[in-house]
Image (cartoon, rainbow, N blue to C red):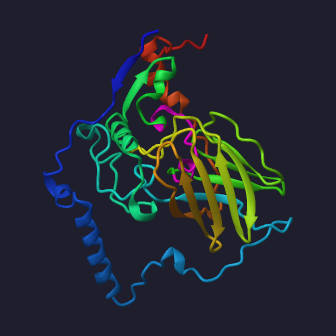
């Protein structure tokens, strides 16, 4: 069946107009933030936020089996799901209708060195991804993966992206396995602690084998499909992606997440990311269902004639 292409991109944004244009360049915003920080620390009684490396030595609680207890509901508060490298303010889709809803705030990235070491062809591919990030290839054949962010189409996020999406996730532990359940799409993955499982082929979440390095959980992840994006900006990987994660509790409420990423088909060398995870401690903390399939069905299936908006309950 022939496919249809739907362009959900916003119209060109004139960043030269208004206050946004004054801070359009990230370097300008960076300078402004630094100056603001200097001014704030001069105010009596102001307490400067601690650097993630300034936590005092911490011994995490133990499970009944004696391993560090990582259980709980955790969440990242970075903007890495939009762009894993540093970025300036950017409007969301259809700003003429949505205004500031969906806009991206400026933020520092999570990539060490603030640059992804792409091969030349891959850098061009990343730009094509960005240009076509909201173009959905509506078809029932593999061409549906040619354009558009997989998140927009309700596919699973993959690793490491699932860990810095703007949704919480929950960790459960046994001696043999660690289960990570993500609120987004109800995705989950099992970290096998008893023995290494062979890598599955063409999976969104890969195969995760774990071990302990002192109080740090080390997870080796591989066996991905060829459709993974790392963010909404078009950063991507191939099916030869290999991720080594390090999960370290640094306080009762914080966990440092680090990962080394390598993909010989896409990057010129391995590279690293790191960010902080925060533990939900409110009394009613729990994962809620975020099932996005019904949300994207009109976009994905109506052009193919597979979707009826009015379905009788008779």
Q: Quadrant of residue 85?
A: bottom left
Residue in view at x 22 percent, y 66 percent: 28
Residue furthest to the bottom in view is 44
Residue 210 point in image, percent of width and height: 73, 55
Q: Is residue 148 above or below residue 117?
A: above
Q: Nearer the viewer, residue 249 or 159?
A: 159
Q: Nearer the viewer, residue 297 or 50?
A: 50
Residue in view at x 58 percent, y 53 percent: 168
Residue 165 point in image, percent of width and height: 51, 50
Residue in view at x 83 percent, y 53 percent: 194
Q: Nearer the viewer, residue 178 or 292?
A: 178
Q: Which residues are magenta?
A: 151-164
Tell me if 102 is positioned left or right of 300 in this view: left
Q: Is residue 109 above or below residue 153?
A: below
Tell me if 235 is positioned left or right of 245 in this view: left
**Where, quadrant-wise, is the C terminus in this rendering?**
top right
Q: Quadrant of residue 70?
A: bottom right
Residue in view at x 52 percent, y 53 percent: 164
Q: Is residue 267 above or below residue 203?
A: below
């Amino acid at each position: 069946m022939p496919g249809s292409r739907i362009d959900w991109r916003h119209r060109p944004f004139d960043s030269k107009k208004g206050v946004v244009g004054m801070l359009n360049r990230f370097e300008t915003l960076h300078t402004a933030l630094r100056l603001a920080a200097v001014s704030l620390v001069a105010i009596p009684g102001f307490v400067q936020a601690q650097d993630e490396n300034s936590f005092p030595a911490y011994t995490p609680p133990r499970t009944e089996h004696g391993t560090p207890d990582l259980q709980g509901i955790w969440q990242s508060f970075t903007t890495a799901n939009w762009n894993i490298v540093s970025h300036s303010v950017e409007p969301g889709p259809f700003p003429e209708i949505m205004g500031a809803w969906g806009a991206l705030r400026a933020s520092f990235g999570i990539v060490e060195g603030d640059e992804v070491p792409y091969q030349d062809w891959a850098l061009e591919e990343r730009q094509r991804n960005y240009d076509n990030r909201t173009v959905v290839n509506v078809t029932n054949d593999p061409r549906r993966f040619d354009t558009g962010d997989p998140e927009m189409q309700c596919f699973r996020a993959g690793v490491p992206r699932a860990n810095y999406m703007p949704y919480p996730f929950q960790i459960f532990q046994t001696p043999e396995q660690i289960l990570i359940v993500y609120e987004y799409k109800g995705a989950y993955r099992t970290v096998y602690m008893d023995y290494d499982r062979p890598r599955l082929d063409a999976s969104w979440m890969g195969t995760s084998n774990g071990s302990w390095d002192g109080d740090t959980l080390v997870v080796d992840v591989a066996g991905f499909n060829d459709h993974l994006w790392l963010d909404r900006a078009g950063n991507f990987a191939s099916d030869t992606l290999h991720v080594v994660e390090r999960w370290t509790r640094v306080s009762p409420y914080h966990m440092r997440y680090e990962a080394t990423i390598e993909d010989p088909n896409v990057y010129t060398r391995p590279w690293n990311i790191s960010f902080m995870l925060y533990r939900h401690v409110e009394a009613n903390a729990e994962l809620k269902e975020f099932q996005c399939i019904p949300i994207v069905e009109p976009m994905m299936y109506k052009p193919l004639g597979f979707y009826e908006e009015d379905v009788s309950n008779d």
